Image (tube, grey):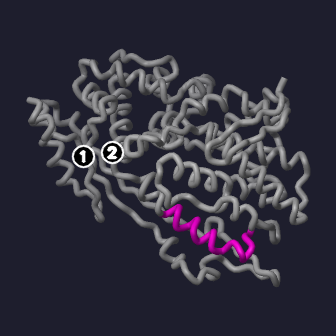
Amino acid sequence: MYKRLVIIDPVFGFITIPEGLLSKIVQHPLLQRLTRIKQLGLSSVAYPSAQHTRFQHSLGAFHLMSEAINQLKLKGIHISDSECEAVQSAILLHDIGHGPFSHALEHTLIPNINHEELSLALMEKMNKEFNGELTLAIQIFKNQHPKHFLHQLVNGQLDMDRLDYLRRDSFYTGVTEGNIGSARIIKMLNIKDDQLVVESKGIYSIENFLMARRLMYWQVYFHKTSVAYERMLINTLLRARELAHQGVELFASPALHFFLYNNKKNFFDNPKALDYFTQLDDNDLWTSLKVWCNHPDKILSLLSQGMVHRRLFKVEIHTKPITQEQKEELINRASCTLKIAKENAHYLIACDGIEKDMYNPADDSIDILYDNGDTKNIAEASDMLNVSLLSKRVKKYYLCHYRLEEQNINT
């Protein structure tokens, strides 16, 4: 039933999925759900061609994992057939816990639970269905397998997840600075003392990788227009949830209705929660937003119209935290201009502090392997990069607010 699949990918060409377990995973409804979730969430508002999905990314990461395993085997690293299939399964399923719009709504629909925890819960659910066939994959995913380097290939500084999303997101956004040499990095991978290392000939590809990652984060992932759009969506859902808790009946799919009206703090306390989560995708949100455009609640309708018709929050980027006085001034202006209660006007304002480092050696260092067997951290080995600057956490403060000047024109 589960025969070999050959898929054409615009980034890597032909991707072959072997028959059996891997083919079964690809065709499973939980992985197919990722075809309905955008990889870059709402970033298409800034980069219109960024329409690719989490499913495409999972296939790309699987392809790179297959290449990496083959390269390591050629260098004499022992990886059994069962370990090979398990690590490929783990990378296929690593993003299965993403909700609608990928990272945009993480901790909003389901507070205090990240997508990695949900991925693990869904992998364990599938493992019961598959009669234990995913047990080894789950051990690798949780870093409980004796070969630590297999976990690093799934979740580490040079994992196949990062190598795919940088290359793929660069391709679909058109931001060429993110086009890393993934093939060369994979060919330079090796193992030393159960740690993933990079042979010294690949040091320049690693330098490019770190720079590309920095550029992609600030140019694409944290683009101010995308941030504003995401904050609008978050505020829209927070307003919808408040109305739901007040007993206002809102249009929503059964799955979205569950998360709007359910008051339980612990997601896993409700046996139905995980099943409802697997029914959610981007379509649930867009359908509700279109209906909410005409809702009698002014806040909900304004925000929904902004989402559907691309009337974005105005964005200001600051180097220092937004003061309470600045927020109060915008709240008062919105309340007076739109004739809404001051206690509700905060939904039209959003402050976000975003910080990111491109390389954290304390987390999982990138080590360069020399011909004599010695290794050096990339921070010491690189003669071009100031890796200490890449390791520094950069923080920017975003002030997003409803465009009141447009409201004045319309009125």
Q: Is residue 213 magenta?
A: yes
- Residue at point 69% right, 72% down? 202
- Residue at point 88% right, 55% down? 79
Q: Dot 2: within a 10 Å radius of its alpha carbon, few (fewer than 14), some, or many (20 or more) residues?
A: many
Asked where in the image residue 6 lies, by quadrant, the reply is top right
Left or right for 394, reference 266:
left
Type of residue at label 1?
Answer: Lys
Residue 118: x and y, percent? 62, 38
- Residue at point 29% right, 22% down? 293
Residues shaded magenta: 197-214
Residue receiving disc 1: 314
**Foreground: 384 or 90?**
384
**Disc 1, disc 2: CB below 8 Å?**
yes
Q: Is residue 70 above or below residue 25?
A: below
Residue 39: x and y, percent? 53, 41
Residue 188: x and y, percent? 74, 67
| Helix, strand or loop status at disc 1 | strand
**Foreground: 299 or 182?**
182
Q: Is residue 381 above or below residue 198?
A: below
Type of residue at label 2?
Answer: Ala
- The disc at residue 228 is 2
| Helix, strand or loop status at disc 2 | helix
